[in-house]
Image (cartoon, rainbow, N blue to C red):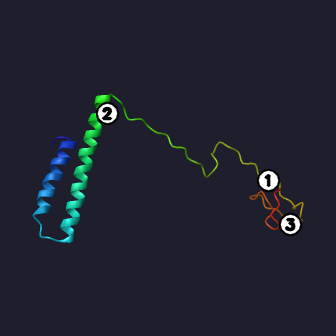
Amino acid sequence: MEAASLEMFRKWLQVEIRDAEELESSSFKEQRLKHLESALQEAMAFEAAWELRKEAKTAFSKVETKVRLIAASPDSEITPMDTGACSNCDSILTDDLEFCASCGKFQ
């Protein structure tokens, strides 16, 4: 069996459209035809864009997206805060917060 190609996909879509047109009129027929025709349009648009890129001799470029890390990296060390009493209200501080849970003062 030969490898799939864009041309084979387009031909398959055209056969599927022909078969769907022979179905009795129903909402399934309308939906199926819309899906197939949309896929065929996208395949043709992709092929046209690909040909333009080949003619212009431009390559696809990989775009790196910036991602905000939620957790600290395993290489970085997390230094726990010195637990003790709040300098404002004398409540006991927890090491996972940078502020007093009682009064809200940053420590």
Residue 58: percent from left, percent from top: 35, 30
Task: Give the CA distance from mark 3 to mark 1.
Answer: 15 Å
In the picture, measured across the screen, residue 21 lies left or right of residue 46, that is left
Amino acid at pointer 1: Met
The structure residue drawn at horizontal position 9% and vertical position 64%, both measured from the top left corner, is: 22
Q: With respect to residue 49, does 57 lie above or below?
A: above
Eye-nearest disc, 2 or 3: 2
Q: Is residue 4 visible?
A: no
Q: Which mark is residue 91?
A: 3
In the picture, measured across the screen, residue 45 lies left or right of residue 87, that is left
* Element assignment for label 1: loop
Q: With respect to residue 55, does 8 lie above or below?
A: below
Name the residue that disc number 1 marks: 81
Amino acid at pointer 2: Arg
- Mark 2 or mark 1, which is nearer the start of the sequence? 2
Query: Relative to the observer, which residue lies in front, 67 or 54?
Result: 54
The structure residue drawn at horizontal position 64% and vertical position 48%, both measured from the top left corner, is: 72
In the picture, measured across the screen, residue 52 lies left or right of residue 88, that is left
Q: Is residue 104 visible?
A: yes
**In this figure, what is the number of numbered marks?**
3
Residue 45: percent from left, percent from top: 27, 44
Name the residue that disc number 2 marks: 53
Residue 73: percent from left, percent from top: 63, 45
Where is the N terminus found, in terms of image quarters? top left
The structure residue drawn at horizontal position 29% and vertical position 31%, both measured from the top left corner, is: 54
The quadrant where residue 46 appears = top left
Q: With respect to residue 26, does 74 lie above or below?
A: above
